[in-house]
Amino acid sequence: MTLTLILKLGGSLLANGRELVRFLSEYAFAKRTARQIVIVPGGGPFAESVRELQRRLGILDDTAHWMAVLAMHQYGLFLADGAPEIPVLDRLEDVRATGTGLCILFPYRVLRANDALPHTWNVTSDTIAAFIAHKLGETTFIKITDVDGLLDENGAVINHIQAQELLEIEHTGCIDAELPQFLLEYGMSCVIVNGHYPERVIEVIEGRATVCTRIE
């Protein structure tokens, strides 16, 4: 049975995102195990341009939502640039049919067909990645970003925290505001890891101890 791993690759890693995708693709190919890695792109500067347009020109929330989802599509195209061997998909059915290896999933068609998330800036690519993981029957996903994880009041990495606790203390840090509630509602978990250290990403994938934050 194929194990599907959902990796949300944040727009904060724009400078080295393509190299990280190629690194993960080579890892998936070298392992040749029953493992499928699905990259869900963040929005990065493409989504930020939508925020700015909404602030300046008064775009409706529904319109801004879909524009921001399409911004994830743009970042996905950027991540796939120069790597034609990596499948680029836009339907869950295609992900399920792909099998092992690595692919990049554009979320626009998936969300249009399953329009269940609120159309606010509280929902960004974090919750969208969790939603996609849930739709694929998975109970966890990995958020790859440019920081080591969530930090406590002293600036130390929080190794493990409950989603309920995040709601109670209104702590979001590097995650979107909707994610803790979504994780609670669907019994899911999330691991936050720094993509500037690719070896940490592999350690999370393989279930080994590393610097990261686990939200359950």
Image (tube, rainbow, N blue to C red):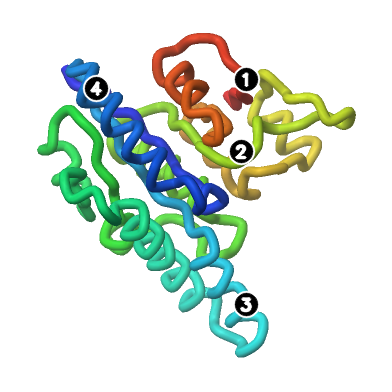
Q: Is residue 73 left or right of residue 190?
A: left
**Which residue is depicted at the point 53% across and 55% down?**
124
Numbered circle sitting on residue 180:
2
Numbered circle sitting on residue 35:
4
Q: Is residue 192 visible?
A: no
In the picture of the structure, the residue carrying the numbered disc 1 is: 211
In the picture of the structure, the residue carrying the numbered disc 3 is: 52
Q: If you read the primary sequence from the N terminus, does the residue marked by circle 3 or circle 2 appear first? A: 3
The amino acid beneath tag 3 is Glu
Q: If you read the primary sequence from the N terminus, does the residue marked by circle 1 or circle 4 appear first? A: 4
Label 1 and label 3: CA atoms lie apart by: 34 Å
From the viewer's side, name the closer residue of 79 and 57: 79
The correct choice, above or below, for 178 with respect to 45 in the image is above
Q: Is residue 1 visible?
A: yes
Q: Is residue 94 left or right of residue 56?
A: left
Label 4 and label 3: CA atoms lie apart by: 39 Å
Which mark is nearer the camera, 1 or 4?
1
Q: Residues within 10 Å of mark 2 (few under 14, many from 20)?
A: many
Q: Residues within 10 Å of mark 3 (few under 14, many from 20)?
A: few
Numbered circle sitting on residue 22:
none
Residue 66 image offset from top left, x and y in percent: 42, 70
Q: If you read the primary sequence from the N terminus, does the residue marked by circle 2 or circle 4 appear first? A: 4
**Which residue is depicted at the point 46% across and 78% down?**
63
From the viewer's side, name the closer residue of 110 and 49: 49
The amino acid beneath tag 1 is Val
